[in-house]
Amino acid sequence: MSAAIHDARVYHKQLFLGADSFDPAQQWKVASALCAYQELGTSQGEELGFGESWLSEQGFFWVLVRLRTVLSLQPTIGFIRGETWKQAETGVLWRRDYRLSSLENRELSAAVGMWALLDRQSRRVLRPEHHPHGYPLVADRMALPQTPRKLPHRRIASPDLLTRHRVSYADLDANGHTHNARYAEWLCDALPYDLLCEHRVGTLQIDFISETKHGQEILLCGEALSPDRRRWSFSAKSGEELCFLADMELIPVIEER
């Protein structure tokens, strides 16, 4: 077992992946990984004494600005180990790293999330010093080697409209906007079913540009960037407002069997 598992600055939690974490081809859904990352960060805040209730009292909430994840190994139904830590502050953004592994400490996925603290009423971004408590800083450890850069806004030459989605009750979280894992579900739902049955998500980056709320119609556009349809680029708008951008790379399942 890796010595890093015992790093007291890193938050650890055992998580359970149930049947709803996998698709009909028995592949791990990327949205399940995103939910696990969210649970880890929220749980660390609760353990340190400034969780959701404290945030609500202060009039704050966290919003995910950018997330990049790499799913390296395929898990099975059962318990896994999760780790998260605050890696750095960059301007108004907080870098939080995540790692999911098997109980034998084989890495399943790694991720970096760039978070911002927002005022609940004004939706204004607050600088880190507005948060009076400090998370342990683990600057010498990274789940992924680089901080994810912004995806370029005009990188899709002629995107096709893949789907329309109206934000529903099931999409929303306690902050009144779409939960970040739902975006990953929208992206997968927009791809051909046969493609997803033969592949799994290997890499995903989502840049969250603006909040999406109940009743908004989202136009999700995208295109395959390679002839084998393994690499995809997406953009989503509500009216003229850009909501999010995403890049995804798929891995053929047959290569892992």
Image: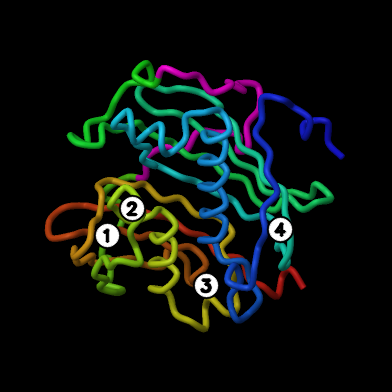
Does label 2 or label 4 sit earlier along the sequence?
4
Residue 45 appears at what percent x and percent y? 52, 33
Q: Quadrant of the C terminus?
A: bottom right
108 and 20: which one is in front?
20
C-alpha gap between disc 4 and disc 1: 29 Å
Amino acid, disc 1: Ala
Asked whether residue 247 is drawn in magenta, I would say no
114 and 249: which one is in front?
114
Q: Are marks 1 and 2 in contact (CB under 8 Å)?
A: yes
Residue 43 appears at what percent x and percent y? 56, 40
Does label 1 or label 3 sit earlier along the sequence?
3
Does 117 sit left or right of 11 as displayed?
left
Does label 4 or label 1 sit earlier along the sequence?
4
Does label 1 or label 2 sit earlier along the sequence?
1
Mark 4 nearby-residue class (10 Å; few <14, some 14–19, many ≥20): some
Q: Residue beneath label 1, please?
A: 236
C-alpha gap between disc 3 and disc 2: 21 Å
Amino acid, disc 4: Leu
Amino acid, disc 2: Leu
